[in-house]
Each structure stands twice: as structure tokens, then as C-alpha cells.
Image (cartoon, grey):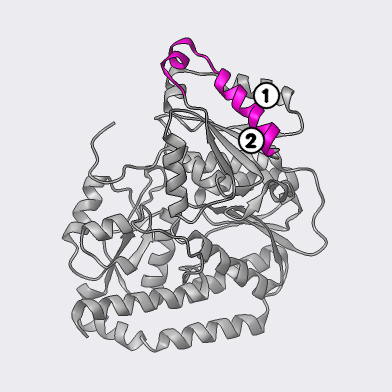
Amino acid sequence: MGLHRFKPIPSGRMGLLWTLSTIRDGVIIEYGCMGHMLYSGVTLKRAGIDNACHLYSTHINETDVSLGDTSRLEKLVKNIVKNNKPKAIFLMPSSVPELIGVDIKSIQKKLKQLYPDIHILYFGSGGFDKVKHNGVQEALTQLVKALTIDCNRSPSPTFNIIGSCADLFRFESDTEEIIRLVRGALGIEPLCILSSDTSIETIKQMGKAHINIVIRQEGKQAAKELKKRFNTPYIEGRPYGIDGTEVWLKEIAQILNMNVNPQFLAKEKNNALKSISIVKPNFKHIIHSSPKQASISIGGHVDVVQGILEFACKELSFIKSKCWCDNIDMQNDEIPYFTEKEWTEVVSEHTDGWLMASGEALKWSNNDLSLQIANPDIKWRIYPYEPPFVGFKGAVNLANLWINSYEAKHGH
């Protein structure tokens, strides 16, 4: 592993944890080293995740490693089944067992025979060759493949959200805005929020939904599985901006052969436009008088970067500067992947316009912390009701952040 000045790209293990830890009635068991899960538990609590999925670690020592003894894992499962009575157990290896080739899958098969009434799932993204998005994708996909049961569509239209995971900054606020929009515009109710607000039982019922809303690329494979099994249509993408949110809602309506509630849409659009119109003249003045100050640089998850960038440039006429994503497998022509060396150069040299990135990057480069849109974070996040970035409310929030950041910087 190379040297890093900042937090390195999270491992696949962390992707699994951020995805599975919010699921109620489940238990995560890591076959790994002492302290691993304790440290992870603190990290999850800082993100506002607690009292959902119970976290356990077997601990391993030199004897376990050298002799390949896995009895600790089997004893721990027995104890958890007796005392916790979970509906599902998620087995998760860490780097050392993965490196020495411990056959967790064989242990999983044995445990399934011993406890047939409990869902026992194995996730394999614990090795050094996996990074965060691998873990998130594997968890989302395996959950729908292993847990969903055969069922018919719900009598009234419902929807699932796929990809609301704790690794995304302000994930709870964005999800609440998406629920509010779909409920208000189309009158349909959420069934399962995979995975930030769900339970084992709710995941089982995902086949009842009339549409799946995939809000990050890692959730696409899960949506395909549901499409294959239940013929459930899905839509990809996150709603940003006023025009972007309207288009997104109408796409959902078209898929479902429904009409968007015209009163709801008109009210929401008018309220957002009214709020933003107050500062639009200021933005136009900045664009014409100081074009460099109207530039915007964004770094983070590619779907978040793409959405905010489109709102800023297409709806407010900001000028795109250097933008990047945090995953090499998701880069595209418009948003490339930047290494630590590359993004540190961008943020350290940033002088003009707006910079939106992780809390860690903004703090280190002495840039405006209010423009954080990505993790790694530098604060506790136990308050889930902060303003969103998506939807009509998100558009107003972003405009508010941008104008205040500009005026704070330029002394107006």
C-alpha cells in the first residue's frame, strides 16, 4: 500500500459496511482482526448510523492464521443466533483471511444447514483488490438476489430507491427530498429505501414495487436483477436543479403511464424559481464582470458531480472548471478520475470561483467548508434533517450556498 497524505480510497470492506450497517434486523459478522469493527463502528456513528444492523467481529490471532482455524466464527454465530435472533446474518471477511484464502463460502454453506430459518449471506469484497464501489455494488446486488421473495405488484403504486447508502454525503436529506417529490408529484409511496432506511422484511417485499429509482451507478445491477425477476422498470439518475428535477419526474411518470400532478409541480417550481430569482441578477453580474469568479470545480461521486454541474452550468450559466470523480471505473470524458496528487493540486491552487469537494479537501486547502458535497468528512453528522442537494429544495439550497460563499470571499 502506498503512502497517502489524506484518507486513501475506501476499501471494498468499507463499501459493504456503509451499505449493510443501516439495515434493521440484521447482523454483520466480520471474520477479522481485533479493533477492526470497533473502529468502523465509531466511523459509522459519526455518520449518524447507530442501532440498526448489529456489528460483531470474531478477532483472529496468529494460531488462527497459521492453522486456518475458523471455529471462532462458528461459535460467534451460534451465540448470536441464541441471544439476538436475527433475521439475517451478513458474513464479511477482512484482508487477512482473504489474503490467506480462508474459505468463508464453505462455512456459509455449513451455517445455512445449521440455521435454515436465518438468511446467511457472504460478501467477498474484503480483499486488497476491492474498493468502495465494489463493496457497495456487491451488497446492493446480493441483497436483492438473496432476500427478495416472489410476490405480486402492490395494489397501489409504490417505488423502491436503490443506492441510498451512508457513504454519500447528506444521503438522508437527499433521500427524503426524493420521497417527497415522488409522493407529491405522482401520489405513490416508498416501499424500500435500499439501504439507508430499510429492514430485512422490507427488502423481501421489493418485488411489489411498480418502479425502482436508482440514484447511483452501483445500484444498476440490483435494478437489473429486479427487472429480470419481477419485470420492474427502473430509472437511473439523481434529480438536480429546477429543470432537471421536472424532467426527472416526468420520466418517472412516463414509465408508469401516469401524469404528474400539475398543481404540485407548478407550486414547487414557482417557489424554487421565486427564491432563486432573488440572487439570479447577482450571478449574472458575476458571470459578465468576473468570468473567472463564475467558474465552478466539483469533486466527489461521479453521479453527484454530474448532477450539480449540470444545474450550475445549464440552468445558472456558471463556467465549468476542473471537475473530477473519486472512482477510476466511473470516470467519463467530462468527469475524469483524479489521483490524490492530482486533486490536491487542484484544491491547493484554487483561487477563483466555487470549489465543491470533500470536507477533508476543503479544510486542508482553506476553502469554504459550507460547499462540502462529498466524504471524507470532518464532522459528526447525527442530524439527518439538513437541506438536501437534490430536487427543488436542493436547487434553492445550492444557490443559497453559492451566493453566500461568493459574498463571504469578496467582502460584499
Residue at mark 2: 89
Q: Quadrant of residue 85?
A: top right
What is the magenta range?
60-84
- Residue 285 x %, y %: 26, 86
- Vertical placement of residue 14 versus 284, above or below: above
The amino acid type of the residue labelled 1 equals: Leu
Label 1's element? helix
Secondary structure that dominates the magenta span: helix
Q: What residue does disc 1 label?
A: 111
Asked whether residue 296 is in view, the answer is: yes
x, y (%) of residue 21? 55, 46
Task: Assess whether mark 1 and mark 2 are in contact (beta carbons under 8 angstroms).
Answer: yes
Residue 43: mark: none
Crowding around mark 1 (Cα neighbors within 10 Å: few <14, some 14 to 19, many 20+) is some
Q: Position of residue 372 (x, y in %)?
A: 35, 63
In primary-sequence order, the first of circles 2 and 1 is 2
